Amino acid sequence: MTTSAIMLVDDEVSFVEAISKRMGKRGMEPVSAFSGEECLELLKSNEHIDVIILDVKMPGMGGIETLKIVKQKYPLIEVIMLTGHATMETAIEGIKMGAYDYLMKPCEMDELLHKVNSAAKKKQTHEKKVHDWARFMESGSLKELMVPIDEYATVSENANVFEAISALEEAQNSFNPERYRHRAILVLDEEKRVVGKLNQHDIIQALEPQYKKSKERSERVLGHFGFGQTFIESVSSHYSMWDNPLQDIYKKTFEQNVKSFMHVPTEAEYIEDSASMNDAIHRLIIGKHQSLLVTGGSGVVGVLRLTDVFELLHLRLKALHLAAKIGEKSDGEKTSLEEGG
Amino acid sequence: MAARILVVDDERAYSFDLSERLRQRDYDVQFCFGGNEALEMLSRRPFDVVVLSVVMPQMDGISTLKEIKRRHPLTEVILHCKNATMQVAARGMCLGAFEYLAKPCKIEQITAKVNEAFLYKFAQEERIRKAKMHLAVLRGQPQKESAWSFKPAIPK
């Protein structure tokens, strides 16, 4: 078994020192904390901790309260409650709340090590499972990560703004609730080919009164972030953009059609479904795109969203982090996101 | 005592079907169709293992998992969903889900994981029972081995 990372939390300094000295002799290097607050603070920089030995009774934040927060923030870390005779009931309460076990003070070193080891083993087994899942996902391709086209809401290019708003709302409410909500809809031409994208930004911009007049100027404003807030404010007050009654805006939703303000994807926003994940990430970065349209045999087959790519990246990094801990070299050697390039 | 299982899935037919198949294998099974409903059922009676679908309208699997783990830390949760939701599975595992099972899968796979989770929970309950006995001894009122102590029954 790999050595486990342990944290000792007790306000009784002599106890902490004695135990860590004895653990030190066995090649363990426990992190020491002398209050619940300090324990939480130290966890921020010691996320690799497997087991916390936590005293039930401490001034300030008590053991139970600390346990609650630890379990909420780091559900996988195992906690062993350290207790005296008088606080035994609290310790049992702790186990019911998810602590792994308890230790009675003064404790036998063998018993302590036994309990620490089995708690650490439980945590490491679970981490291994997480790690396996993350690795399993690494073999995933662009196709698996993208949102299939049939899950996306679409409107016809001749639809008006009101219809587009309704479609976007529907898309946000109904599809695939386990992922992030959709923030965009696709625009189809008469032959059901994807010709554009619409997001909330496009729609609100289209509704802006005197949109056409301000368009040129606002593009300049948005295009060059060098303009100060004062300048942007003066532009909007000059055109008094949102001062018109809502009635006007409502009318406008029926007048304009989607085609006139949708975002027409450039060539760089299309990517083949056989392309590599690296290529896709590169394109997202270079073009500052929120998503790419994935093309397959029959035209656009899905949308690859920045949020999904980000989450994948995050999980892979986490997997590497775990792998480094578990001691698997193979994973650490790969710096590329691609499995086998 | 057989494992008490709660099946939570908004696909009503699936939920019903899975429960029935587990029941035939001698588990004590209840089912419901949503996260809120599941939390309510858990507050009414204890369950050992929750088989939870990740994709559900209203309260999704991840929020339900978080809430179950907050209110009933000892109850083990097995996530169950379609293959396309791997990322959610990994996130759920980080949040303390016991295991993840792709849908559809063989009933044997489900029962194997349910049994594993049940034994895990049982071990934890044993620790609590022993701690209580220890406490009683400390107070000078040792109890006989409780008549209520049970052995986990793993259906064959």
Image (cartoon, grey):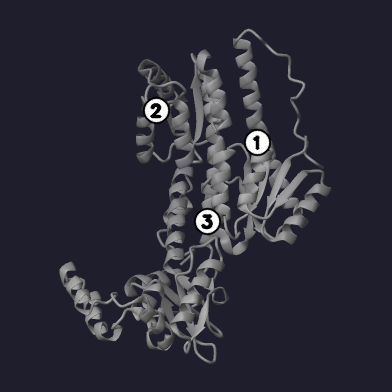
Residue bearing mark 3: A135
Please tell me which residue lies in front, A48 or A24.
A48
Residue occupying the far right of the picture:
B24
Please give the name of the residue rendered at 48% of the width and 69% of the height, measured from the top-left corner: A182
Residue at mark 2: A61
The chain containing the residue under callout 2 comes to A
Judged from the image, the secondary structure of the residue bearing numbered disc 2 is loop
Q: Is residue A126 above or below residue B135?
A: below
| Residue under the point 58% across and 54% down | B61
Asked whether the viewer can see residue A274, the reply is no
Residue type pointed to by label 1: Lys
The image's mark for residue B121 is: 1
Q: Residue at x 25, y 86 (%)?
A: A213
Where residue B18 is drawn, which disc sits there? none
In the displayed structure, A168 sits above or below B44; it is below
Residue drawn at point x = 73 percent, y = 14 percent: B144
At label 2, which amino acid type do we have?
Met
When asked about the image quadrant of residue A60, the answer is top left
> Is the same chain shared between marks 3 and 2?
yes
Q: Are marks 3 and 1 in contact (CB under 8 Å)?
A: no
Location of residue A264 by image quarter:
bottom left
Residue B4 coordinates in the image, percent (x, y): 73, 41
Q: Residue A250: x and y, percent?
A: 41, 79
Q: Is residue A279 left or right of residue B32?
A: left
Q: Chain of mark 1?
A: B
